[in-house]
Amino acid sequence: MPNEVLISLSDISKTYIMGEVKVEALKATSLEIYQGELLVILGPSGSGKSTLLNLIGGIDTPTSGQMLFGKALLSNGREKDLTRYRRQEVGFVFQFYNLIADLTAAENVALAAELVAEPLAVDDVLRDVNLWERRDHFPSQLSGGEQQRVAIARAMVKSPRLLLCDEPTGALDFETGKMVLRLLRDIQKNQASTVIIVTHNTAIADIADRVLRMRSGSVAEIIINENPLPPERIEW
Ligand SMILES: Nc1ncnc2c1ncn2[C@@H]1O[C@H](COP(=O)(O)OP(=O)(O)OP(=O)(O)O)[C@@H](O)[C@H]1O
């Protein structure tokens, strides 16, 4: 288990206010995320999983509390620092891929590469996700699994320290889903990236180094998996 802390959250909370209604999506939460770990976040609908992921990724800002990336304070209210962090250090993978429809697979990846000073080579990344033959296809010409691999390539090309995945297998069949999980595991191992996967699918927890369970806006428990399973071995 790696133990160098990459991100630490101290008493982070997020409250959404909609007119008269206040929703405490995340209640004072303290948490450390380690360099190079695969963390799976589980929990029922509405328990705060995506809120936590979006705060970790700098997509959203906390209502209160402190968040550090290494020694850098991210919760300082400076949008410029958060934008730099999001662009340089974080890759996102979503359930429905979010590819740009009128760009080819290679162009979707190249666009992300432009965001960072030292991207990986687009061609190498397309080969890594086994899409070299499909690089000139548009998203509508690709299967769901292939589109998700383009989305992963788009995240990977930035060589991010942190890969955040919200239900990455949610729209995929079982076999394709396992292939995507294998790819995420390989990225985490080969690039020493930290990978966080949010899911409803409890079976995916078996591949994690640590499993975090959310309940009603709080972390209910964190379990360390001494022997994570290879993605090929899980069943759902
Ligand atoms: N932008 C928003 N404005 C208002 N309320 C929000 C917003 N985003 C989330 N919420 C509320 O915060 C709570 C936590 O939502 P969140 O999306 O984090 O849960 P989740 O565990 O990811 O759920 P799901 O598994 O259904 O995606 C929910 O009650 C949700 O309705």
Image (cartoon, helix red, strand yellow):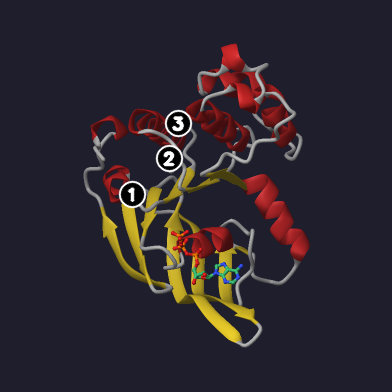
At which x and y percent is residue 1? 32, 48
Q: Which mark is residue 169?
A: 2
Badge 1 or badge 2: first in the primary sequence: 2
The answer to whether residue 118 is visible is no
The residues tagged by marks 1 and 2 sit, at their Cα atoms, a distance apart of 9 Å
- Type of amino acid at the residue the image marks with label 3: Asn
Q: Residue at x 53, y 79 (%)?
A: 23
- Type of amino acid at the residue the image marks with label 1: Asn
At which x and y percent is residue 225? 25, 50
In the picture of the structure, the residue carrying the numbered disc 3 is 190
Q: Is residue 35 left or right of residue 160?
A: left
Identify the image quadrant of the C terminus. Answer: top left
The residues tagged by marks 3 and 1 sit, at their Cα atoms, a distance apart of 25 Å
**Helix, strand or loop at disc 3?**
helix
Mark in the foreground, 3 or 1: 1
The residues tagged by marks 2 and 3 sit, at their Cα atoms, a distance apart of 21 Å
The answer to whether residue 15 is visible is yes
Q: Residue at x 63, y 26 (%)?
A: 140
Q: CB under 8 Å between callouts 1 and 2?
A: yes
Q: Decide which of 96, 161 is in the foreground and name it.
A: 96
Q: CB under 8 Å between callouts 3 and 1?
A: no
Q: Decide which of 162, 24 is in the foreground and name it.
A: 24
- Measured along the vertical axis of the image, is residue 133 above or below residue 67? above
**Helix, strand or loop at disc 2?**
loop
- Label 1 Cα neighbours within 10 Å, binned few <14 / some 14-19 / many ≥20: some
Q: Is residue 27 left or right of residue 42?
A: right
Badge 3 or badge 1: first in the primary sequence: 3
Mark in the foreground, 2 or 3: 2
In the picture of the structure, the residue carrying the numbered disc 1 is 201
Residue labelled 2 has its Cβ within 8 Å of some atom of ligand 1: no
Res 157 quadrant in image: top right
